[in-house]
Image: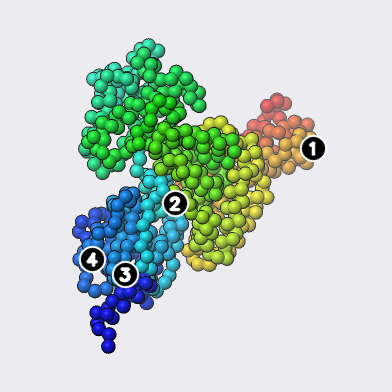
């Protein structure tokens, strides 16, 4: 008869080979242990773990502070085992199986532990945070939770990952679950390092010479100036101020040395003697050698007291080019600004890649600043595969920090989800990510139609738009306030998109899948109404010569006005109350996007035909002029009739 010790050993071996029980038949077989020294992030992550396991299996895992004598224990945060966290990034984590009944999740910091819990929920429970909001998370229903006893060690390829423009807790929580964590400060900041209200009085020499005179900014002229980087004592003052900041904020990982906005560099003799005197690729006077040498000195001084800190800046304007004589400090991350969707143009890609490589030769660590806007674009602007390509290139060439102006429109579906997955691991298969997202979002039957919808618009933004009059090779980013790309879209494409999403809604299976399909369809209604409003506003390019042509244009303008009213209602009335569908950049920010004048533009093309008393044209104008409500189109029709009756030309 086998001894009890041998039986226990065999059971342990089998458990380690097959996995560790956490839930069996809907009943908890494990507890979560969070020690007293775990910290708030670990405790919050443990509570989230309990909530999702309960939603998935029906079992509630107890949270304890002391290790029980029996049963499976899931340790979150510090634990009795000496897990090897050597060399792991602060956002990284280990999921370990130190003995037959223990699972341990731990990172070097609270962030790493938190992200390890999210990995546990994704990998073993099957959770997917697809979109923000109450319906955006897909939670599989299951009775058993058996965790394979295979250790996981993971860290992000890009250690700082941040989107701007997210709206409200629903969206920021979603991004955090998908591992977004910005760790580098880099925006315009020198006006805060040397506040004018103080330093113009105590150290006026810290401020620049403009046109042979010392410029002393006020709080009302916060930008348009830079410090005099050669002023005696300015390095020491910066070190003192930054040390004081880190003393007061010891957990803050970085400080921005970003120059102020809109140029204003010093032209004193000492500064001019330290620059090349030439122009950079933006045709600005190149101040890179002077600025980065100053930044290096400041960083060296701060690191003597705070050796683990990072610094960021914008490779922007006069300091956009890599320095010629200076090597950038390895703790300074210059962010290169560009809308890298534009890299689908082969020439722009070649230029952009060469600039990144040149920068990497001077700076060990780089950041990329991107413009991946969802709003205010009027079509789903997606480029999943191209995004993966440039993330991979960036990582291979020193880019380790990413920031993007996202301002999302969640009608773009998996765009930001795929982006965050790739920011953690750019080697992931984009097609696999997309296929899983589509299936988990709306179900197997509906997924092919949703995939076809996004593939159509990915093709538009990565191929067709490159040949459009709207696409520009100049500038750092595309003109998102100009919807002229709609000239290259046919209404047949809009009808096809509507048909695909209608089929998605019909074929979606579960209540949650139908809710997500409905949300995507509602988001599409804004795209749809905008496209109809724009295309119907001026449907004919040829001269209008007959009454029939004139009446057709007037009818089209009236239909355009109906769609203009709908898009305004969606964007300004309905969507702002929705935590997911709200537009972070309202259409009121741009006259081009408000669309009030779109329909009226076509109206005036019929003036000559109406003036000739063509049959039916004035009557149709009268119908539009008497339309309900003080619409812009009705007002334009009334004005035209007034001019016609007075025999005047507009």
**Could you tell me which residue is drawn at 36 percent across and 67 percent down?**
149
How far apart are the two marked residues, 4 and 3, measured between alpha carbons?
A: 13 Å
In this picture, residue 377 sits left or right of residue 114: right
**Which of marks 4 and 2 precedes in the sequence?**
4
Q: Which residue is at a point 23% across and 29% down the rendered structure image?
A: 240
| Residue of label 3 | 60
The image quarter in which residue 650 lies: top right
- Structural distance between the alpha carbons of marks 1 and 4: 83 Å
Residue 434 located left or right of residue 203 = right
Q: Residue furthest top?
A: 212
Looking at the picture, tell me which residue is in the foreground, 410 or 49. Answer: 49
Whole-angstrom CA distance, mark 3 to mark 2, is 32 Å
Task: Give the label on residue 546, or none.
Answer: 1
Q: Position of residue 19 (x, y in %)?
A: 36, 71
Which of the pair 568/129 is nearer the observer?
A: 129
Q: Which residue is mark 4?
A: 64
Element type at mark 4: strand
Q: Nearer the viewer, mark 3 or mark 2?
A: 2
Percent position (x, y) of residue 308?
27, 41
Vertical relation: 581 (above or below) 509 = above
Q: Are marks 1 and 4 in contact (CB under 8 Å)?
A: no
**At which x and y percent is residue 604?**
68, 33
Residue 496 percent location from the top left of the image: 65, 54
């Amino acid at each position: 008869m086998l001894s009890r010790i041998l039986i226990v050993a065999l059971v342990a071996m089998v458990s380690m080979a097959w996995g560790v029980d956490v839930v069996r038949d809907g009943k908890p077989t494990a507890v979560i242990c969070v020690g007293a020294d775990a910290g708030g992030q670990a405790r919050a992550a443990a509570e989230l773990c309990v909530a999702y396991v309960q939603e998935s299996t029906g079992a509630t895992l107890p949270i304890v502070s002391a290790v029980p004598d029996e049963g499976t224990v899931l340790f979150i945060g510090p634990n009795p085992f000496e897990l090897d966290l050597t060399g792991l990034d602060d956002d990284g984590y280990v999921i370990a199986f130190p003995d037959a009944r223990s699972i341990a999740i731990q990172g070097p910091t609270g962030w790493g532990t938190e992200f390890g819990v999210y990995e546990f929920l994704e990998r073993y429970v099957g959770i997917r945070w697809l979109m923000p909001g109450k319906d955006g998370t897909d939670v599989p229903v299951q009775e058993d939770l058996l965790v394979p006893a295979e250790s996981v060690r993971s860290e992000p390829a890009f250690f700082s990952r941040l989107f701007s423009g997210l709206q409200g807790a629903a969206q920021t929580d979603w991004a955090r679950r998908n591992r977004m964590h910005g760790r580098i400060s880099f925006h315009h900041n020198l006006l805060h390092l040397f506040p004018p209200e103080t330093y113009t009085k105590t150290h006026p020499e810290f401020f620049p010479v403009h046109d042979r005179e010392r410029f002393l900014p006020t709080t009302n002229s916060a930008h348009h100036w830079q410090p005099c980087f050669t002023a005696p004592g300015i390095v020491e003052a910066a070190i003192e101020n930054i040390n004081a900041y880190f003393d007061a904020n010891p957990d803050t990982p970085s400080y921005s040395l970003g120059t102020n906005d809109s140029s204003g560099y010093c032209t004193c003799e000492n500064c001019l003697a330290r620059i090349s005197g030439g122009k950079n690729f933006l045709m600005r006077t190149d101040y890179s050698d002077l600025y980065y040498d100053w930044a290096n000195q400041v960083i060296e001084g701060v690191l003597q007291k705070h050796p683990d800190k990072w610094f960021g800046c914008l490779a922007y304007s006069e300091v956009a080019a890599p320095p010629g004589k200076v090597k950038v400090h390895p703790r300074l991350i210059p962010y290169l600004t560009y809308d890298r969707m534009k890299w689908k143009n082969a020439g722009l890609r070649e230029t952009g890649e060469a600039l990144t490589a040149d920068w990497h030769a001077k700076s060990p660590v780089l950041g990329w600043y991107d413009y991946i806007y969802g709003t205010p674009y009027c079509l789903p602007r997606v480029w999943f595969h191209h995004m993966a390509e440039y993330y991979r290139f960036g990582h291979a060439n020193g880019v380790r920090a990413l920031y993007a102006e996202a301002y999302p429109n969640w009608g773009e579906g998996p765009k930001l989800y795929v982006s965050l997955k790739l920011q953690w691991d750019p080697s992931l298969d984009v097609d696999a990510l997309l296929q899983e997202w589509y299936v988990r979002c709306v179900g197997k039957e509906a997924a092919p139609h949703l995939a076809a919808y996004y593939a159509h618009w990915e093709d538009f933004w990565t191929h067709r738009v490159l040949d459009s009059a709207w696409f520009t090779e100049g500038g750092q980013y595309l003109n998102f306030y100009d919807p002229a790309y709609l000239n290259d879209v046919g209404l047949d494409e809009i009808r096809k998109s509507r048909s695909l999403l209608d089929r998605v809604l019909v074929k979606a299976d579960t209540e949650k899948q139908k809710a997500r399909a409905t949300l995507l369809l509602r988001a599409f209604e804004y795209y749809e109404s905008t496209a109809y409003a724009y295309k119907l506003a001026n449907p004919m390019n040829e001269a209008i010569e007959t009454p029939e042509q004139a009446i057709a244009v007037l009818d089209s303008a009236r239909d355009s006005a109906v769609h203009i009213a709908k898009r305004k209602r969606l964007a300004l009335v309905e969507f702002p109350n929705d935590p997911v569908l709200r537009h972070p950049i309202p259409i009121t920010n741009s006259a081009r996007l408000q669309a009030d004048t779109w329909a009226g533009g076509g109206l005036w093309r019929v003036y000559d035909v109406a003036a000739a008393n063509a049959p039916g044209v004035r009557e149709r104008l009268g119908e539009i002029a008497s339309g309900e409500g003080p619409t812009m189109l009705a007002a334009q029709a009334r004005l035209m009739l007034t001019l016609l009756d007075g025999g005047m030309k507009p």
